[in-house]
């Protein structure tokens, strides 16, 4: 468990086939049901959330804000590889702003707060899963529902700092 950065939250369930409730030490997500010891020993192992997103929350990363003129939509998200942003940019998303973090875990926490704030206003997702080649549709909104200026300002107040570059525009 510890080799895979998982903290057991309950005693060993007594079988390698029974899910073991645990907390991922990288993203701090509680895995309930957790992985079974059998799976952990296998090739995949570890936290499914971290694996699925292809990010390492314990490494430097960034929170980004991009816009798509064709869809008239904005998107926020996190990554710790430049490649991730490049994927979206290749699909005609434009970078509006980014905030760098020493730990992607901190960016992740902000990402969740942003989602709660946007959805809490009754603003729906702008895109469906099949419209995004590189995923991440759950962090989108139409510009008619949420402007770049408003979301940038919210993120600045949330993080307590201005974006690195480029500056928000428009
Ligand atoms: Zn994790």
Image (cartoon, rainbow, N blue to C red):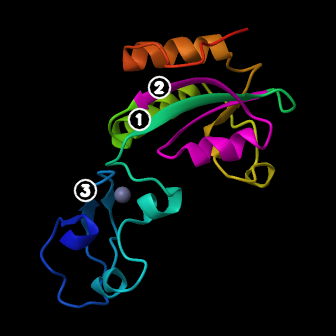
Ligand 1 within 8 Å, label 1 CB: no
Circle 2 residue: 99
* Quadrant assignment, res 124: top right
Left or right of 33 on screen, residue 69: right
* Label drawn at residue 25: 3
Total numbered badges shown on the rendered structure: 3
Please, what secondary structure does the residue beneath circle 1 have?
helix
Residue 14 screen position, x and y as percent: 17, 89
Q: Is residue 146 magenta?
A: no
* Quadrant assignment, res 105: top left
Please, what secondary structure does the residue beneath circle 3 have?
loop
Circles 3 and 1, Cβ within 8 Å, touching? The answer is no
Magenta segment boundaries in residue numbering: 73-100
Ligand 1 within 8 Å, label 3 CB: yes
Circles 2 and 1, Cβ within 8 Å, touching? The answer is yes
Residue 3 screen position, x and y as percent: 22, 72
The first of marks 3 and 1 along the sequence is: 3
Q: Quadrant of ligand 1?
A: bottom left
* Label drawn at residue 107: 1
Q: Is residue 75 magenta?
A: yes
Q: Report, in whole angstroms, how far the alpha carbon at label 3 lies from the one at label 2.
A: 23 Å
User: Which of 25 and 166 lies nearest the eye of the viewer?
Assistant: 166
Bin the neighbour count of mark 2 within 10 Å (Cα to Cα): few under 14, some 14-19, many 20 and up.
some
Q: Which one is closest to the eye, mark 2 or mark 1? A: 2
Residue 52 screen position, x and y as percent: 51, 62
User: Which of 100 and 160 lies nearest the eye of the viewer?
Assistant: 100
């Amino acid at each position: 468990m510890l080799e895979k950065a998982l903290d057991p939250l309950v005693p060993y369930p007594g079988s390698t086939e029974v899910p073991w409730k645990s907390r991922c030490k990288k993203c701090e997500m509680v895995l309930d049901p957790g992985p079974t010891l059998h799976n952990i020993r296998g090739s995949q192992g570890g936290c499914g959330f971290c694996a699925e997103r292809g990010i390492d929350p314990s490494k430097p990363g960034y929170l980004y804000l991009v816009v798509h003129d064709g869809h008239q939509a904005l998107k926020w998200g996190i990554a710790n590889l430049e490649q991730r942003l490049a994927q979206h940019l290749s699909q005609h998303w434009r970078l509006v702003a980014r905030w760098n973090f020493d730990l992607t875990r901190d960016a992740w926490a902000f990402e969740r707060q942003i989602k709660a704030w946007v959805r809490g206003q009754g603003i729906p997702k702008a895109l469906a899963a099949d419209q995004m080649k590189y995923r991440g549709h759950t962090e989108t909104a139409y510009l008619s529902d949420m402007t770049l200026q408003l979301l940038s300002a919210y993120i600045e107040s949330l993080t307590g700092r201005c974006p690195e570059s480029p500056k928000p525009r428009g």
